[in-house]
Amino acid sequence: MKKLEDYVRSIPDFPEPGIIFRDITSILQDADGLQLAIDSMQELLKGVDFDVIVGAESRGFVFGAPIAYNLHKPFVLIRKKGKLPCETVSKEYDLEYGSAEIEMHKDSIKPGQKVVLVDDLIATGGTIQAAAELVESLGGQVVKILFLMELKGLKGRERLKKYDVDSVIQYEGN
């Protein structure tokens, strides 16, 4: 039986020399790989008491929605600014070169709800930190942050040290 790492395609020197891009499309394009990814992430939620799963655009949707479906939990979207139709709350955060803004519906998290945040990859942690702060601004409690992959060399976990963070696959470099 293949390990999840065996489904990840590693592309050297993308997007620039010295970087190894970890491509998840090779996981998604293989039924066994996709099932293993979802099952592996879901396994990390055993024993976690939570009410709702929140997925960060866009790959957090790919992994978060099936987990929410399997566990019969609601699923909430965090999107790039301007993509949601109802009243929203937003959070701006810094990128390596510039800034970005994410938002979620103002009524999507109820005060006191226990939330699991899901995304595909933790690099520097900026996006998911902003997502956690959005959830908290609505009165939600982030009880777990879950990733498929982690680039340990970029130290995103340090930025999220006040949260319970878990990842299925960990790569030492960037």
Image (cartoon, helix red, strand yellow):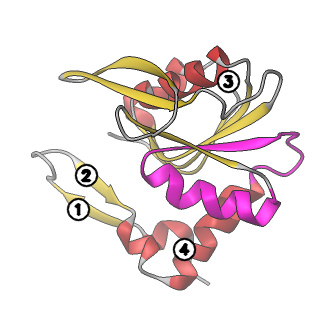
Residue that label 4 marks: 34
Label 4 and label 1: CA atoms lie apart by 19 Å
Residue that label 2 marks: 20
Give, as a single range, the part of the protein colored magenta. Answer: 44-72
Identify residue type, mark 3: Tyr
Earlier sequence position, callout 3 versus callout 2: 2
Residue closer to the observer: 158 or 41: 41
Quarter of the C terminus within the rendering: top left
Q: Does any portion of residue 25 appear in the rendered image?
A: yes
Residue that label 1 marks: 11
Earlier sequence position, callout 3 versus callout 4: 4
Identify residue type, mark 4: Leu
Q: Position of residue 38 (x, y in %)?
A: 63, 65
Label 1 and label 3: CA atoms lie apart by 31 Å
* SS for callout 4: helix
Taking the view exactly as shown, the residue that stands out farthest to the front is 86
49 vs 11: above or below: above
Q: Nearer the viewer, mark 4 or mark 2?
A: 4
Q: Nearer the viewer, mark 1 or mark 3?
A: 3
Label 3 and label 2: CA atoms lie apart by 27 Å
